[in-house]
Amino acid sequence: MWDKPSNLAAPLLALSLLGAHALRADEPVTPESIQETVINPAAPPELTPADVNAWLDGFMPYALAQADIAGAVVTVVRDGQLVANRGYGFADLEHRTPVDPDKTLFRPGSTSKLFTWTAVMQLVERGLIDLDADVNTYLDFKIPDYRGAPITMRHIMTHTSGFEEVVRDLIVSDPAAGGMALGDYLRENIPTRIYPPGTMPAYSNYATALAGYIVERLSKEPFADYVKRHIFDPLGMQHSTFVQPLPEAMRASMSLGYKNIKDGKSQVFEIIPASPAGASSVTGADMARFMNAHLADGAGLMQPETARLMHETVDKQFPGVNSMALGFYRDDLNGQRIIAHGGDTQWFHSNLALLLDQNVGVFISLNSAGAPAIGAALLRPELMSEFMDRYYPAPRTAPVALPTAREHGALVAGDYESARRAETTPLLALYFVGQTTVKMLPEGDLIGPGFPEVNGDKKHWREVEPWVWQAVGGDERMGARVEDGRVVAIAPEPYAFAIPSTRAPWWRSKSLLLPLLVVAGGVLALTALAWPIRAIARRAYRAPFPYQGARAKAHRIAPVASFLMLAYFGAWAGFMAWMLGSLDNTGDASRVPLMGLYLAGVIPLAALAGMAYVNRVLWSHPSKWFSKAWAALLLLSSLVALWFAIAMRYYSFEFTF
C-alpha cells in the first residue's frame, strides 16, 4: 500500500514541529546559513514512561490540529516493557468517540507486511521455504522468468523482484471483495517484469501478496488464519486481524478513516484484495507486543538466529544509503541502527521503527490523510525525528564537499523517473509528470531529488563520499549507481531502500518532451480556436469564404484535426483523474472507457495524415509564407503529440494497471 508522499510545503507545521531543526526566524535561510548550522546535543532526558508520556502529550495534540488529522495512536516500548501507549483525537468525529490505545483498531497499511515477512521467516526456519529458490516451486501458477532469470523469496523480501507498479483493485470499497481468493487475485493481475531480478529496488505490493500466498499454500491455512494462529495468538494480540470485512466482534472498535478534520466525512472500511500487502487491523497495545517480540530476537515467533538473519541481512544496492533488510528496511538516524516499515491506505498512515541496539520500538498510526501540504506524510517522520533528537541525539556538522563534486555532479544532472512505476501501461504518463530534474549548482552541489524541505524548497545535496551526497542542513543521504561511467540511477533517502529513481530515457525525458508538448499544444489550440473566430468574423462582416477546392478542404481540415487531437488528450487526462479519484475505479469499471480511449488512438494518426495533406496543399498552391510556416508547425505539433501518445503507452491495449 505504502506510497511515496507528495510534495510537502509546510511552513506552518515547520514552526510547530521542527523545534531544534529550525533556524531562527530572523535569520535568512541560505545555503551558507544552513552549512554553518551545527547541533551539539545536551544530555538527553531518560526514556521513562513519565517523560515519554509528558512529551507526547505536549507534541501530539497540537501536531494533529495543525496537520488536520482526526486521531492517532502512539506506542513506545523498551526492554520488553510498555513505555507509552497513548490515544489522541477521535476515532469517530461525529460521535466524538476518543481513540482508546488499548481497544481502537487502526489500519497500518503496508506496516502489515511485517506480519507477512515474519510468517515467511517462520517457514524458512521450518525448512519449507528456501530464500534463494525459484518462487514457482511453491506456486500453482507460473510467474514468467525475466530473460531466463526467475525471482526468489529473497528478491521479494528486498523488493528487487523487478515487477512494474500496479494499482488495479489495490484498494476497493465493495465488502464482497474481502472474500476474493488471494490466488485468484494474483493470477489475474501478474505485473510485467521491467528489471532483471535482484538488480533494482522497486517496491511491490503484488510481490508481497505473492509471498503471503506462498505462506498460505505451504501451511495449508488461509493467510489470515495462519497469521492469527502463528503470530497474533502466540503474542497475545487479541485485538488484531487480517479478516476483511472485520469480524462482527471487532467492528465497534474500528476507528473510522477520514480525509481530514475539515472534511469530516467518515470513509468506508477499505478492502485490500492483496491482503498480505496491507490488510491488517491492529491496536497500539498489540503492536507493542509485536515490537517487543522482534526486539527480543523474535521471542515467541522464531529462533534468535532466524530473527537476526531477518534484521541484519542488508541488500546494499546503492552506496551510502539506508537499504532493505529481509522485509524490514534500514532507517538509521542519529547514528542508531534502526529497522522500520511505513504504511498507507487511502485514509490511514502509519510507521513502525525498532532501535535494535537500544531495545526500543516506536509505532504511530493516524486515521486521516490530513491537510494536503502538512498532513500525515510529514507528521510521521517529524515525530520520529523529534523522538530521536530528544532521547538519542547526535551532533550534526555541515557536510564538506569532495574535490570530485563538480565532475560527479555533472554526471548526475538530468531527468529521473521513479523506479517504482508503471512501464507498460498508460499510467506511465503520471510518472512522466512526476519526473525529477536534477540540476548542478556552480560549486558542484545538486538540487532537486528527494523529499522537499518543509518550506517547499527542493532538497540541496553535497557530495561527501564518492557517489554519495548528504542533504545540506539535514541527515538524508543519496547514492548514485554508475555503469560504464554513466549515472543510471540515484537513491535519495528517506525512500532509497525501495523507491530509487532511474534516469529517464531521452525520448520521454521531461526536460525535452514537456516543452515540446507545451508548444505543440499551443499551436493546436490556436488553430482550433481560429476556426470559430474566423467564422464569426466573416458572418459579422458578411465576407465570403475565400477558398475553393483543395485549398478550402485544407483550411477546414487543420482546425478540425487540431480540435480532435486536443479532445483526445483531454479525454486521457480526464480518465486518469477519474480513475485515481477513487481506487474503486481502477478495476472493471475502467475497462469500457479505457477500450474507448484505445480505439480513439486512430485520432492522432488521422490528424497527422490530415496535417500532411494540409502541408501538401499549401506548399503546392500559391499561399502566404505565414500559412505555409504555420502548416509546417501543425505537422510538427502533430508529430510531437503522436510521439507522446506512443511513449506513454496509449497504444498498449493493456487493461491491468
Image: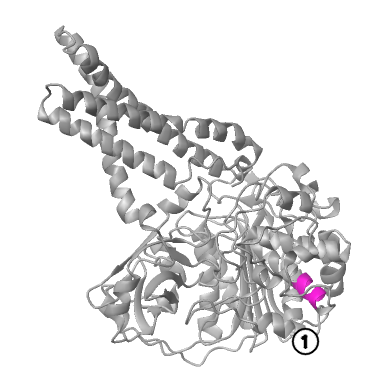
Residue 634 in picture, x, y percent from top left: 26, 33
Residue occupying image coordinates x 56% and y 88%: 45
Give the answer, above or below, for where 215 lies relative to 564: below
- Does 375 lie within the magenta span? no
Instruction: Write the start and end of the magenta stretch as one range.
Output: 118-124
On screen, residue 97 versus residue 575, left or right, reads right
Q: Specify the quadrant of the image occupied by residue 208.
A: bottom right
Please report the residue visible at 74 percent of the width from the left and 82 percent of the height from the top.
307
Q: Please state if 42 lies on the left or on the right of 124 as rendered.
A: left
Residues 63 and 571: in front is 571
The number of callouts visible is 1
Decide which of 51, 390 is in the foreground and name it: 390
Query: In terms of secondary structure, what is the magenta stretch mainly?
Result: helix
**Res. 84 in view:** yes
Label 1, secondary structure: give it. Answer: helix
- Pick the front one: 18 or 204: 204
User: Looking at the picture, does residue 277 appear above or below residue 301?
Assistant: above
Q: Quadrant of residue 151?
A: bottom right
Q: Which three-letter amino acid code belongs to the residue tagged 1?
A: Pro
In the image, residue 110 above or below residue 132: above
